[in-house]
Image: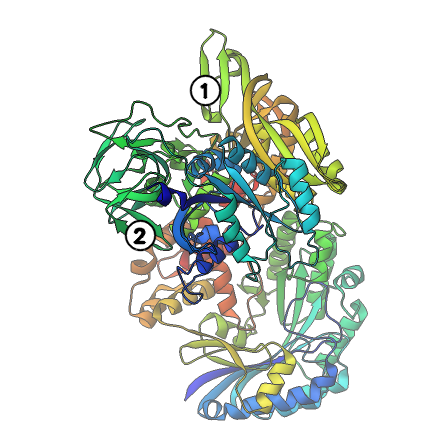
Amino acid sequence: MEDFKNRIRNFSIIAHIDHGKSTLADRIIEKTGLLTEREMEDQILDNMELERERGITIKSQAVRMIYNARDGNGYIFNLIDTPGHVDFTYEVSRSLAACDGAILVVDAAQGIEAQTLANVYLAIENGLEVLPVINKIDLPAARPEHVINEIEDIIGIEAQHAPCISAKNGVNIEEVLEAIVKYLPPPDIPKGDILKALIFDSKYDSYKGVIVFVRIMEGTLKLNQTVLMMNTGCTHLVNEVGYMKPGGYTPAEELKTGEVGYFTASIKNVGDTRVGDTVTAAENPSGQPLHGYKEAVSMVFCGIYPADGARYNDLRDALEKLKLNDASLLYEPESSVALGFGFRCGFLGLLHMEIIQERLEREYDMDLVTTAPSVIYNVIKGDGTRLKVDNPANMPDAADIDWMEEPIARAGIIVPSKYLGNIMELCVERRGVYIDMVYLDESRIQLNYNIPLNEIIYDFFDALKSRSKGYASLDYEVTEYVRSKLVKLDIMLNGEKIDALSFIVHESKAYSRGRKITEKLKENIPRHQFEIPVQACIGGKIIARETVRAYRKDVLAKCYGGDISRKKKLLAKQKEGKKRMRSLGNVEVPQEAFMSVLKLDT
Amino acid sequence: MNDLRIYIHIPFCKQRCSYCDFVTYDDKSYLMHSYFKALDTEIALNRQYIEKSNITSVFFGGGTPSYPDAKFIKAALNKFDLAEDAEVTIEANPGTVDFEKLSIYREAGINRISFGVQSFENDMLIIMGRIHDRSMAIRNIKDAKKAGFDNISIDLMHGYPLQTEEGFRNSLSSVVDLGVTHVSCYSLKVGEDTPLQSMLDKGLLPEIDDEKDRNMYKAAQGYLQANGYIQYEIANFARPGFQCRHNIGYWVLDEYLGFGAGAHSYYNGRRFSNITVLGEYIRSLNELKLPEDYSETIDMEESIKEFMILGLRMTDGISINVFSQKFNRGLYSVYGNEIKDCIDSGLLISNGEKIKLTQNGLDFANKVFRKFI
């Protein structure tokens, strides 16, 4: 038994986007002989279309491999792939908690990035042994020695033994496998033998119900056992246990201490199997759940509406299906005068929001109109009552508000020094308060700022990328709520307030935001037979105005030469465009107009 | 014998106008010989369709059909056996013709000439990038009369940036003074990727003023009607009996074959068009291959749409009877709601036999057409 546990290595791979995490994972799977090269579909672990395209992992995945090491022993490798973005920090921390070690992949040319840093610290906090691997040594700009020193200086872990590899070309992959055996520890030996298993992910399968991914911390998980989820309190009868293999499952009789695997128990709802929860035996439960469990907290909210109002039910069905696999997605029906029926949705962060929107559009073929993202504000009314407001529509009258509070994020930005000025300027524009700055090496700097979250969710990431030619990286974490002068900015078209365009903004930003929005709307609202004033106002006060001029004709004057097909197409296209417009009072507003106000800086 | 109309595209110009995005080239004159040879081939490849038809009109459009040597036009026209009363039109730009050239056209059997004058104001002609001036236009039109043309059309443009209502009215009175039989008066449409478009985008010319444009349009309607021209289409006016039969053919779904680069055809239930790139058009025909690159089948449903959006262009409108004879269905059973909407919003009017655009409908015709698409 002792010997068996010594031959298990549970680890994850930490890397910045593009540093080659998935490619290395593929090589490891290939080298351990699970699949031949021909059978391997590139990047096995990122199996969602969107994940592949964006090169990020959204859902955790795990896979079990057998490696025959040079010492003559066979080792069980459990590779647990972690989501790769700040929005999923909690999920990452739970995946890491299921591991005993982590491989840190660093691009030999780029060096360490902000997000890598954040995840390495998470791994260290979770008590993981970190094994650095220098990837992409085949690049002409590769500076492996430099990067090794950087790792030692900045992270403070030893890196001289780091394998230097090219995952893409399959160079030195053996060294990584041997290093895993040599430097990463086997699972700890627990004190007792009462079942305690950590849920690090779950997913919905239409045949099996929810498939729960667990790491057994203590005891044994057996087939036909009744288990209890300690935090949610539900019990279920286990009807399958086993190990994960790439693209499938290998059923087994039981999962022992230190092992990583899955079980199913006819569970209908992923909400019952929350990441971080502890699975124990219902008959002989553990007294103490594993620590670190948190409920998913939504940080960013927006309204999502079908572009074609008739597809409301399709949107609801699509959200329901996404929710099956993503317990952190929140949604509830809301209605807007301007947009009709839709949903108020809550997300872990900005990327999470974008991913959900994109999946709705691609996987469910929905055409969406979304409203400006919002954070949760605390509103303290004159009578002393406190409200949480995540939707501008629910903001009380200015006269009833005593004061408001907004969330502040601590943002860590790593940027090449030549873009430092641009990025500091951006942070100041976004009401950032400088904390400090650390030179990582002669050419790169880590900047730390306190920035209000509502500035970060408003196309900050795009601006960051465009002002650093794509080189800056960002990590953020909400740390506190502070008192702030916030106002509700309303937009009026032809004198009518458009609820879907309202948002909450800092007083100092209201004028410039109002001006930009009215300009964008003017560009995106087609001319009507009458003049349309586009106004931004706070309370009753108008702070910006543009006018969509009236048109006096809509006619193709010249129609000869016999090119009828093109004219029909043009008319048909215009007609299609009209269908997708929203009638607000007597003004027709296209979907693009709603979307145009979401990106003002780029 | 079926009636058939013929369109021949001449994609050459001396100089491209600022607003133009038509299929034409001002730097490929060296291809003229090869082009007309290819045109011959294309006509020859279609002989079977031409020979079994009664050719009721021929239209040389461009580009500038009057720019190449007249012998090319004459040769092309000679390929067709025309109906006795066939209408044969050539588009001509002032500055590319003289009395002699016009006489050759006339002798070759061309009986209608349409001058792309656009304006009689010298300032506007410079801004538009035209090669002629006012006096040149007047001289050419007089030459045409002398050469024996008694059916002359003038194109005028309105709504051009910087154009004034007064200047446009002056152009109108010049047209009437010249005593031509037909006037096309159309609102500027800025072609995509044209010098005009880019100047407007950059703010180098003032934005087009819809209101002025409509005032000019209304001035044209009033002035031309007062002088004996009848408006028969959104942009066309004619003395009685001088409406352009070829163009009306497009609007009543007559069949036509188009020859030349980018030319369009409607024949045997199909709309199709040719390659627009000159070299490729010529190469295809040198290999005896038809240069078709777009085709669309027109079934009954599609034909009904076309009947509506083209027929309603004419001020006479569409006849409820003709509709049911043509399609074996009642107009109101197909478009009852759409027609009612348009009548309610003042864009269409019906007298029980015909449905046509109102004055307001002429300004917002696309709104009506979109209903029927």
Residue at horizontal 74%, vertical 84%?
A: B30
Check whether the beta carbons of the residues at disc 2 and disc 1 lie within 8 A of each other. Answer: no
Q: Nearer the viewer, residue B223 or B81?
A: B81
The answer to whether residue B183 is left or right of residue B317 is right
The answer to whether residue A584 is left or right of residue B363 is left
Q: Name the residue under label 2.
A: A249
| Total numbered circles | 2
In what quadrant of the picture does the N terminus of chain A appear? Answer: top left
The answer to whether residue A477 is left or right of residue B295 is right
In what quadrant of the picture does the C terminus of chain A appear? Answer: top right
- Is residue B111 visible in the rendered structure shown here? no
> Percent from the top left, x then y, of residue A542?
61, 25
Identify residue type, mark 1: Lys
Q: Which chain carries label 1?
A: A
User: What is the C-alpha distance between the residues marked 2 and 1?
Assistant: 44 Å
> Percent from the top left, x then y, of residue B146?
73, 82
Q: Which label's residue is closer to the chain start, 2 or 1?
A: 2
Q: Name the residue under label 1.
A: A388
The answer to whether residue A34 is left or right of residue A398 is left
Q: Which of A520 and A348 is in front in this view?
A: A348
> Percent from the top left, x then y, of residue B160?
70, 56
Identify residue type, mark 2: Tyr
**Element at badge 2?**
strand
Q: Which of marks 2 and 1 is in front?
A: 2
